[in-house]
Amino acid sequence: MSTPNSKQAIPRISAARHVVPPQWALTERLLIDQLNKAAFEFVERYTRPDGTLIWRQDWPGMDGSDDPYEGFMNLALLYMLGGSSELHGLARKIWEGITWQWTEYGQIHREFDAYYDWMHHGEGYLFTYFLGLAGPVTLKDRQRAVRFAGMYTGEDKEALNYDAERKLIRSAISGSMGPRFELTEEDWSTHRGILDDYLAPYEDIPAVDFASGKCPWSNDEVYAYIIRLMNERMTRGDVPLNLNATGLVTNAFLHTGEEKYRTWVLDYLAVWQERTQQNGGIIPDNVGLSGEIGEYNDGKWWGGYYGWRWPHGFMTIIEPLTNACMNAALLTGDMKMLDLARQQLDANWELRKEQDGELRVPYKHFDAGWTDYRKAAPQYPVYLWTMSMADEDLERIDRIPKDHDWNQVIIPKLSGTDKKTKRNTKHYIGNTQPWFQYIRGLNPNYPQQILDANCELVAQQLTKMRSEAGNPYNWANQYSEDDFSSIHVWQEMCPIYMESLVQLTLGGPMHISHGGLQHARVRYYDAEAKRPGLPESVAALVKELTAQSVTLEFVNTSQFDNRSVIIQAGTFGEHEFKDVSFLDEVEGSMDKTTVNHKWLQVDLPAGTGVTLQLSMDRYVHAPSYDMPWLDCEKNVHLEGRKLY
């Protein structure tokens, strides 16, 4: 992979065709305006002037530092897309406020979660990845990225989470205080009421009927027994969930370009490939400190923490694996890096069987074998296909029966699962399937439908936020209420959700909610303001994707202001534009211009629009958070005292 010469002048073209703004363009700009206003109202409702959250005086247990970050992280993402310039500083202030506040609660240490699992770390540290995209990045951003990654590469002697010799993360519970081999009853105290309705983590808990699918964590004797078994069977050694840590290390590479971070990601993914081969093609969910599969679990390859048996099964196997494979492909440009995720999807599909007239795949493995058969989830092969554009990944999507209309746009009601379509709606992401249909040319009305739905979602969330239930001074001082834990409340009240903008303007599905980077085909900068995002009054639509090109439409909805937008090839500048053709709706392609750059400036005089087809070479540059303007301080890194 190469690094382009940043001194090379950015090619520049100009639109000349005056247009009446189409409805999608007007709705897109309306949505950005509504999101800006909603963001400021949300911040006013739930935070103090110093960026801390209006909330309770204490919060016990290890759960929860991820949730406030999740509630406010889209401030940074909205800014990156073209939201108000004030959002940049506001997002940073609230990140600092949350970090300080949860340090005072006792869970964050050295600005990073002291210890928890990588499903929750993955969710919470999306905020830091979005801040990287919301450049220009700061010295603090880079310093933290390097320090946080060091906690998982073996460089941080206070957080020895990684065994470099065996290439394993030493515990399912890890963080800035290192591996957590001994959990306490206090650690899980906030989850007890919630987990009463979950499957038991073990099949041999006295007085618990495993077949019932429930386990009384609220029973003190049962609870004490579970904690003891966790410490015996689950807290030592590696689990697939830890593959989400590749996002944190990739984040450090995006900030610094240092080869050691790429090497770590590739080595860690490779060792899981070896473990999978050793286990006959199914990824094992627990590996002991010696590297032995099932070391603390009577030799069983199933039964680990967030593994094949408890609590979610396949979801928390395939998600971190997909994230890690995509990170490795981003860092190398080699689509073979997706193979381990592909293989697990194929292995899972091979285990399918017909139930109630439907093809279903197993999500869990108990001592008696495969179980919990469900409909296959299409979003994971969609992510792989969006990156690879390979026929084999398209086939993995197309083999899944369409149990509902994939063109149907939904408006999520909770950060969870849509009851009708069964789509996952974590972070209010629910329309990956209809976007996939659109980008394949099978859902032509999708842009207007998803923009309208997104506007309705913002209104829905504002109504919820403005209600008495949304008043933070009315919230009960307990751990579980209604449909969600009380610490999830900011996600449920947040109105700053913009799946439509990511899909339509960037040309990709939204991030995987448990720690996925925001991969997409393009992103934008305001050439005049020298900041990320679409310039004011400019609307963008990715109309088509192929392995060699992207087709984009731009509209300057203002009749009074000239605008200039810089298109970047790839979210992280990993691609290169080769040439650009102006497309005329009637006459077809014309006026091809050579680009040979990862950036292209498009000038949009007042009232003009243009449709461009950009040919491109994909994954040819080292990815980074670099903006089109030179960053003189990129390699600055502070060194602290060495005290003895």
Image (cartoon, rainbow, N blue to C red):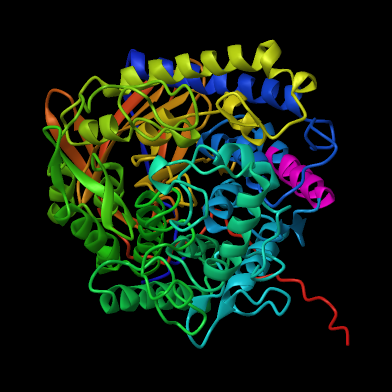
Q: Is residue 156 left or right of residue 267?
A: right
Nearer-the-camera pick, 474 or 128: 474
Residue 492 to residue 227: above or below? above
**Residue 564 placement (x, y as % from top left):** 47, 35
The tally of labels here is 0
Dominant secondary structure (helix, strand or loop) of the stretch shown in magenta: helix
Q: Which percent across, then down, holds residue 258?
A: 53, 75
Inspect the magenta stretch and tell me whether residue 98 lies in it: yes
Q: Position of residue 151 (x, y in %)?
A: 64, 71
Q: Which portion, as a residue range, is magenta?
A: 91-105
| Front residue (pair 446, 269) | 269
> Quadrant of the image for the C terminus?
bottom right
Taking depth in this image into account, of 1 and 538 the one nearest to the observer is: 1
Residue 287, compared with residue 377, is above or below; it is below
Q: Quadrant of residue 79?
A: top right
* Residue 173 visible: no
Look at 49% across and 52% down and name the residue there.
515
Q: Residue at x 66, y 34 (%)?
A: 87
State the residue lying farthest toward the front: 207
Which image quadrant for residue 566?
top left
